[in-house]
Amino acid sequence: MNELRHLMTPLDFTVDELDRLFDKADDIKSHLASYAHSCDGRILATCFYEPSTRTRLSFETAMLRLGGKVIGFADASSSSASKGESVADTIRVISCFADICAMRHPKEGAAMVAAARSGIPVINAGDGGHQHPTQTLTDLLTIRSLHGELGNFTIGLCGDLKFGRTVHSLIHALARYSGIRFIFISPPELKVPDYITEMLKSRNIPFEEVIRLDDVIPSLDLLYMTRVQRERFFNEEDYVRLKDFYILDKEKLSRAKSTMHVLHPLPRVNEISVDVDDDPRAAYFPQVQYGLFVRMALILTLLDLTDEHMNHGLLKW
Ligand code: CP
């Protein structure tokens, strides 16, 4: 019996473990039907104290496609958190019902508190402005699939680099691969936090900070657009001033490489014009589907069920 394993940040997995996870996700993508009973009899709990469309439904779809079942709540007001129950108590209760739990919470560190008290694997599905590791796994699998490798590219991260937890998780994860140059594109108020630029400096990883997307778009292999995170602003006035700072439209995209890929964790507000959606470089909807396959692979990995389905159900000799 392996020891209980959680996912709090993408760095909880080594690069080799991530390679295996992505290989598994690729295999699931190619042989979806052969995984239809991989989690028979298992239950996933989704405990979402904050709104979500993709992450919650993608986890639930992942478990259903693996043959398991799903329980949970989609907002704190419909759970006993509204009566004052702590996350630590809630996870002890959920551990009596389910085999694995995906948790989203507005407070940084909430998933870690849960993991410390849990009897089942806990997956951080987003904790405040801190980390969103399964979005990062989604982004890495998308990049590996579309670019062909996790390394040797210039990536522009554009928009709200201060509050965007997907950006923070992704930079930390990409910093482990070689040949990557980061270009951070944001207004001064929404710059990437200093602790991240200090980390890059200490590891001699090249990065630039710029304000104008137009100046750098021709040099990018990947462009990661992000939404301005209204829910994390202290006042509405600042949000309104900054919310439409960047809008990627057809005209701007015409200056990019024909091979560049545009990613976005979604939801989108105005930062990518809908006229970009039909451009072959727009990868943000395929990215959602990669998220499903990687979450299926993650559930199998944390439940220690990966080997049982090698060779698609055929006996290994
Ligand atoms: N990308 C993402 O986390 O989307 P949701 O907030 O809809 O889950």
Image (cartoon, helix red, strand yellow):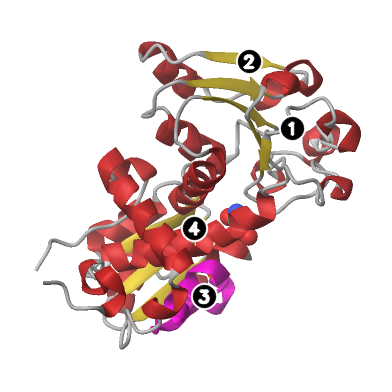
Identify the residue under disc 3.
Answer: 61
Mark 2 vs 1, N-terminal side: 2
Q: CA distance from mark 2 to mark 1?
A: 24 Å
State which region is magenta. Answer: 57-80
Q: Is the Cβ of the residue at disc 3 closer than 8 Å to that at disc 2?
A: no
Q: Amino acid at mark 4?
A: His
Identify the residue under disc 2.
Answer: 209
Question: Depth-wise, is mark 4 or mark 2 nearer the camera?
Answer: 2
Q: Label 4's element?
A: strand
Q: CA distance from mark 4 to mark 2?
A: 30 Å
Mark 1 vs 4, N-terminal side: 4
Q: Residue at x 72, y 18 (%)?
A: 216
Identify the residue under disc 4.
Answer: 105
Q: Residue at x 81, y 21 (%)?
A: 214
Mark 1 vs 3, N-terminal side: 3
Please identify the quadrant where the C terminus is shown.
bottom left
Mark 3 vs 2, N-terminal side: 3
Residue 90 at x, y percent in the picture: 36, 72
Q: Label 1's element?
A: loop
Question: Depth-wise, is mark 1 or mark 3 nearer the camera?
Answer: 1
Q: Amino acid at mark 1?
A: Ser
Identify the residue under disc 1.
Answer: 258
